[in-house]
Image: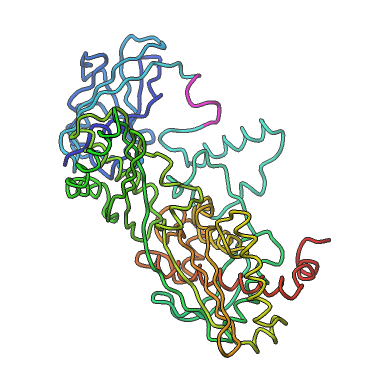
Amino acid sequence: MFVPSILLKQLYTHGSLTKTEEGVSFMLKNRLKDATIKELRWVSIDGEKIDSDKITMQVGPGELLSVDELNDKGDVKFDLKQVITFHLKLDASASHEKRKIGISFVASPFGKLKFEVEDNITEPSSRGGHIPRDDHDDYGESIIKERQRYFEKQSGGKVNHVGKYSIDPSELKGNIEHFIGVAQVPMGIAGPLKIDGEHAKGEFVVPLATTEGTLVASYNRGMKLLNMSGGVKATVQDDAMQRAPVFVFKDARGARDFVKWVNENMDSIRKEAESTTSVGKLTYIDNFLSNKFAFLRFNYKTGDAAGQNMVGRATFAACGWILDHYEGIENFYLESNFATDKKASQINIMRTRGKRVTAEATIKREHLLSVMRVDPKQIDYHGRVAGVGSFLSGVNNTGLHSPNGITAMFIATGQDVANVSESSAAILYSELTDEGDLYLSITIPSLIVATYGGGTGIGTQKECLELLGCYGRDKVHKFAEIVASVVLAGEISLASAISSSDWVSSHEEYGRNR
């Protein structure tokens, strides 16, 4: 299996070359995919190969192997995110001067691998700051306790609630570093909410994690109203996740010719990108030219994962192949800020990032009057006035508060909460029907959600997804439909409260206005 050189070098942990009592050590971390090491062929420093009897490797907590032991075994696990520490017996001193570290080994499923990187030797005390950590077992009870004591000593306080949890820390690799405990957020439920989606069908009771008074009550009230008029219709319209590298050329003509070459070699680029994932599919590449820069926006389907890390790794592999096969590239950055990761942007509203999903309902006039004490005409008129306010402010959301429900659901179900920045964009539309009822719909063009991977498999988060029937594979579109439907319930509830001047009184009764 071909591994681009730029990707292969990422196995080395830069800054890990450290002076020890017997010589130096450095670390490799698997940033590709699960693998097994079949043979270590050689290790070199500044081009000089180190004798095999001077090399030992820590492949796990307390597990040291010589080169002969590793090669005799011929099947040493090197899982994704696993660290292997190499200890070399040689005479070396800490220095700011760069040293060349080379390594050659055989690993399945990649075959023969070889790369060379540069790093300088540092003193142990200068590496990694002061927070206690264990490179091979950083989620064990002893190192967690040591970090808690360190935190207490530094702060002069006491770790109490933070250190009480029901999850298994060993399952948190890839979710958190320097783990000491958990943050507990109150959780309530709203519903049931009747949804007629293509994936979410039936009634759903929704967990909402928040510290904002009136939020759960408001969403619950909106759900009650929507149910009375038949519930919500939800539709996923698009699905895409991006990474956007930029390539720098001598001039604009070079950038233009490069984009033409990329389009002509799409099949090869797709093959390299998809070789890093069993789930991700590269659908197309947008290109945007400016000055002497070629911005490429790689668009993927990512299955039930949110996919930012997945598409980052896949795009990095594809760009490695591009760099190895196209001459004239003067510089390259994997992320140009054009994917707008963790940032709201107009391009995501137009082109989709995550899931583009719409929730809509027609709400009977009599139900609005009886439950919300408001006429559809009041909400429709207020919406048009608020539309002017949205235009004047330049906001990315013509609705009222969709991030409230999205954030509360994200915390409850283990989503990456920072993705609310993109998911906050929304387009709310309303109209009066001939019968005097209110049609209301909201489109969320960049809802980034997952039902597999990331934080979705942790304790309470996994449990909440399971209670919604949304944990695991082939469930992400169902979850997206539920989120959008919940958002619609919150919009009609707050719109009714504002239009009927009931907003402040509700906060007086349930919230913080004391």
Say if 298 sits above or below 449 in the image.
above
Q: Residue 190: horizontal and vertical position, in percent?
A: 61, 73
**407 displayed left or right of 289:** right
Q: Quadrant of residue 434?
A: bottom right
Q: Residue at x 80, y 61 (%)?
A: 513
Magenta region, mostly helix, strand or loop? loop
Q: Residue 389: horizontal and vertical position, in percent?
A: 65, 60
In the image, the segment drawn in magenta is: 126-132
Nearer the observer, 187 or 340: 340
Q: Residue at x 37, y 54 (%)?
A: 241
Q: Residue 138: horizontal and vertical position, in percent?
A: 46, 38
Q: Quadrant of residue 402?
A: bottom right
Q: Quadrant of residue 424?
A: bottom right
Q: Residue 266: horizontal and vertical position, in percent?
A: 20, 48
Q: Quadrant of the N terminus?
A: top left
Nearer the observer, 2 or 79: 2
Q: Quadrant of the C terminus?
A: bottom right
Say if 111 sits above or below 398 in the image.
above
**Residue 368 is a magenta residue:** no
Q: Residue at x 41, y 44 (%)?
A: 338
Say if 472 sits above or below 454 in the image.
below
Say if 24 sits above or below 231 in the image.
above
